[in-house]
Image (cartoon, rainbow, N blue to C red):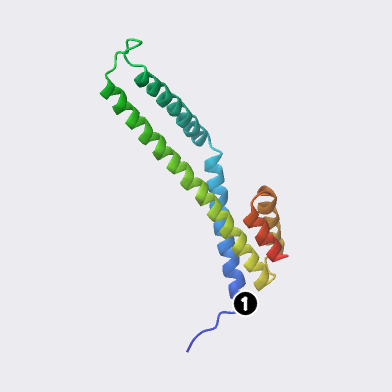
Amino acid sequence: SKTKVTDKELHKVFYQLGRFHDRAYQRLLATKESVEYRRSVDLIQRNKAKLDQLQQGLDTRGKGGLVYTKSELKSHMVMLRKNIELDEEKHSALHKSIRDSLKSAVKCYTQCLLKGNAYDREVVYRLVALWFKNPNDHEVSRQMDWCA
């Protein structure tokens, strides 16, 4: 025989899932706002500037008496490009995880409200807080419109 899941059980599941994704969202935001992340952003900018400088040195080689060979410059440039690419991929993955966690938290919290009212006060508070923290996020606004 099949067991039927009640709205009360679904309500609790959506509440727990919403809290899980909300906490993940908050942790990911803390990572983005950390000193380490800012250092990583600065490092990317410095590496890009250094890459531009090396490219200019490669383009003007022979005119200024550089001490590096063309192959040494190219090798160093390849390494810098790869480091920049890897760091930017990590940042992109972090931004995607933040968006996904936010979207999942809002979706689960809205489903929680539709299935019951045991956690309404906390859920409404978190939904409004997430909405106000992300006023330009069209997907959050759309989900909030759907919820209203």
Within the image, what quadrant is residue 44 found in? top left
Badge 1: few (under 14), some or many (20 or more) residues near its Cα, within 10 Å? few
Question: Where is mark 1, residue-wise?
Answer: 7
Q: Secondary structure at mark 1?
A: helix
- Residue in view at x 56 percent, y 45 percent: 29
Image coordinates of residue 22 in percent, x first then y, are 58, 55
Above or below, comparing residue 16 to residue 29 in the picture: below
* Frontmost residue, 119 versus 53: 53
Image coordinates of residue 109 in percent, x first then y, are 63, 63
Report if residue 36 is visible in the image.
yes
Image coordinates of residue 141 in percent, x first then y, are 68, 56
Is 137 positioned to the left or the right of 57 in the image?
right
Count all numbered tags in the image, as a single digit.
Answer: 1
Picture quarter with the C terminus: bottom right
- Residue in view at x 26 percent, y 19 percent: 69
- Residue in view at x 68 percent, y 53 percent: 131
* Frontmost residue, 29 versus 137: 137
Report if residue 19 is visible in the image.
no
Residue type indicated by callout 1: Asp
Above or below, comparing residue 81 to residue 2 in the picture: above
Image coordinates of residue 55 in percent, x first then y, are 38, 24
- Residue in view at x 26 percent, y 24 percent: 71
Is 49 positioned to the left or the right of 14 in the image?
left
Within the image, what quadrant is residue 43 found in? top left
* Frontmost residue, 101 versus 47: 47
Above or below, comparing residue 39 to residue 128 in the picture: above
